[in-house]
Image (cartoon, helix red, strand yellow):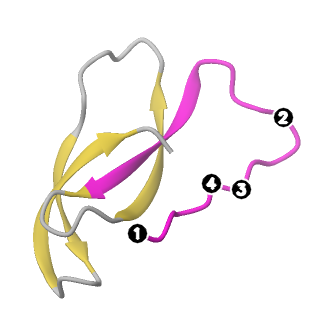
Amino acid sequence: MGVRVPPALLMAKKAKGSHTVGLKCTVCGRFNYAIKKQRSNRKKMELRKYCKWCRKHTLHKEAKL
C-alpha cells in the first residue's frame, strides 16, 4: 500500500497544454514526485531520482496519479 503524492498545487488558472503525472519508483512502487508534462509529448518519462523510502537513487517511471 503506497503513499500517493497529491497533485501539484495550481495557481489561479489551470495550464491548458499540460497535465499532472506522477513518477513511480520501480523498486518499491511508491509515488515520490508529481510533475507537469506537456500533452503533446506522448513518450513516458523515465528518470533516475532519489527515493526516500529506498534511500537511494532509483529509476522512476511516469504513471497516472
Mark 4 or mark 2, whichever is nearer to me: 4
Q: Secondary structure at mark 4?
A: loop
Residue that sits furthest to the bottom in the current view: 55
Q: Secondary structure at mark 2?
A: loop
Q: Does the residue at mark 4 contact the one at mark 2 (Cβ under 8 Å)?
A: no
| Residue type, label 4 | Ala
Q: CA distance from mark 4 to mark 2?
A: 13 Å
| Residue type, label 2 | Lys
Which residue is the site of mark 1?
2
Q: Tag on residue 8?
A: 4
Q: Secondary structure at mark 1?
A: loop
Q: Quadrant of residue 42?
A: top left
Q: Earlier in the sequence, mark 1 or mark 2?
A: 1
**Range of magenta residues:** 1-24
Q: Tag on residue 9?
A: 3
Residue that sits furthest to the front in the current view: 1
Q: Secondary structure at mark 3?
A: loop
Task: Locate residue 8 relative to residue 39 in the image: left or right.
Answer: right
Q: Residues within 10 Å of mark 4 (few under 14, many from 20)?
A: some
Q: Is residue 12 magenta?
A: yes
Q: CA distance from mark 2 to mark 3?
A: 11 Å
